[in-house]
Image (spheres, grey):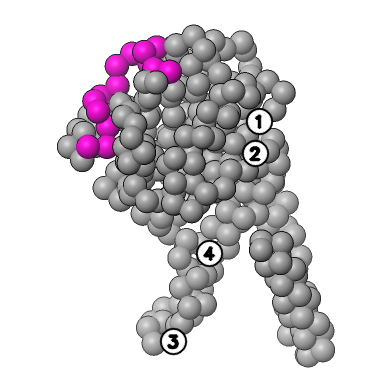
């Protein structure tokens, strides 16, 4: 099976390295300097040739580049072409806009770092992580099953298969909203001169504040309805805490904190 990875940044580079560890070889498609670095590191065998030469193409590019490639590139008849974008509905709509000669499967690895680029890629990045495989009535089951087997070999420990809409609703909450909250949290002037006043809470809240706006702005807008709904819900809940504090209602605040604690305990139980 001839494999191509298009995009050799943090995720694509880590996929390339994980494939090497699993006994596979892939070619790489990226800027010449990036591909050369990946070759020197042994992550890819060579620079990409004609896309029509590959049985499996993994696209690890920003959303607009991903959609352009899926819509205009020429792939091998019957090839499996998978993207790893953080939004799935918008990408799937482009693919389904006309008949394709390839078998498309949308994927999303739930792993990453606060840094980017091939230099930060790691063959162990996906060890113990989960991978989401998106499928609908048009998805080729054999293609999805092959990818699932390959992902396990790359180190993923849990595969979740769901629809694109379900994925986007969940990711709006578990990932994209969290980034926005962290990014807004650090804007307080009280954060200045924080040394000596912080523990784990501050680190947890600020770890993902430094999002790359060149990438994340577009991802947010491609899923903006879901994110806006989650943001409205969060603001609604936060306002309850604000009212309890401003109105001096200590019992109300205690009830709110208890409600949140019980909700967290229930979620922890579901994860067991």
Q: Which residues are magenta?
A: 42-55
Mark 1 or mark 3, whichever is nearer to me = 1
Q: Is residue 162 shown in magenta?
A: no
Q: Residue at x 25, y 28 (%)?
A: 45
Residue at disc 3, secondary structure: loop
Residue at disc 1, secondary structure: loop
Q: Which residue is mark 1?
A: 135
Q: Which residue is mark 3?
A: 197
Q: Is residue 213 visible in the rendered structure shown here?
A: no
Q: Is residue 44 shown in magenta?
A: yes
Q: Is residue 87 above or below residue 3?
A: below
Report how far apart the C-alphas of labels 3 and 4 lie in the structure.
Answer: 18 Å
Q: Position of residue 135 (x, y in %)?
A: 65, 30
**Pointer 4 local density, CA inside 10 Å: few below 14, some 14–19, many at least 20:** some
Q: Is the C terminus in the top left, top right, bottom left or bottom right quadrant?
A: bottom right
Give the mark nearer the N terminus: 1 vs 2. Answer: 1
Mark 2 or mark 3, whichever is nearer to me = 2
Residue at disc 2, secondary structure: strand
Q: Is the N terminus in the top left, top right, bottom left or bottom right quadrant?
A: top left
Q: Residue at x 71, y 41 (%)?
A: 166
Q: Is residue 259 above or below residue 214?
A: below
Report how far apart the C-alphas of labels 2 and 3 lie in the structure.
Answer: 43 Å
Q: Are marks 1 and 2 in contact (CB under 8 Å)?
A: yes
**Pointer 3 local density, CA inside 10 Å: few below 14, some 14–19, many at least 20:** few
- On the image, which quarter does residue 17 sit in? top left
**Pointer 1 local density, CA inside 10 Å: few below 14, some 14–19, many at least 20:** some
- On the image, which quarter does residue 91 sit in? top right
Q: Residue at x 36, y 13 (%)?
A: 53
In the image as oriented, which residue stretches furthest toward the left?
A: 40
Give the mark nearer the N terminus: 1 vs 3. Answer: 1
Residue closer to the observer: 93 or 136: 136
């Amino acid at each position: 099976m001839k494999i191509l990875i298009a995009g050799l940044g943090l995720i694509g580079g880590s996929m390339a390295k994980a494939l090497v560890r699993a006994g596979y070889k892939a070619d790489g498609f990226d800027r010449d300097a990036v591909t050369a670095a990946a070759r020197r590191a042994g992550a890819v065998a060579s620079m990409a040739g004609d896309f029509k030469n590959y049985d499996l193409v993994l696209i690890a590019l920003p959303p607009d580049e991903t959609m352009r490639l899926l819509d205009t590139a020429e792939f091998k008849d019957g090839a499996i072409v998978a993207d790893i974008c953080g939004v799935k509905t918008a990408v799937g709509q482009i693919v389904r806009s006309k008949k394709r000669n390839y078998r498309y499967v949308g994927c999303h690895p739930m792993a990453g770092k606060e840094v980017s680029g091939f230099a930060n890629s790691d063959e162990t990045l996906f060890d113990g992580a989960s991978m989401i495989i998106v499928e609908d009535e048009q998805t080729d089951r054999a293609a999805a099953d092959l990818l699932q087997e390959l992902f396990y070999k790359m180190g993923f420990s849990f595969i979740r298969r769901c629809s694109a809409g379900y994925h986007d609703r969940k990711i709006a909450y578990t990932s994209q909203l969290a980034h926005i909250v962290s990014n807004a949290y650090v804007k307080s002037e009280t954060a200045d001169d924080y040394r000596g006043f912080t523990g784990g809470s501050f680190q947890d809240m600020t770890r993902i504040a430094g999002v790359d706006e060149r990438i994340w702005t577009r991802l947010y807008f491609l899923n903006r309805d879901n994110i806006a709904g989650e943001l409205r819900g969060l603001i609604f809940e936060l306002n309850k805490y604000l009212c309890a504090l401003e109105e001096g209602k200590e019992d109300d605040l205690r009830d709110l904190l208890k409600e949140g604690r019980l909700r967290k305990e229930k979620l922890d139980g579901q994860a067991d």
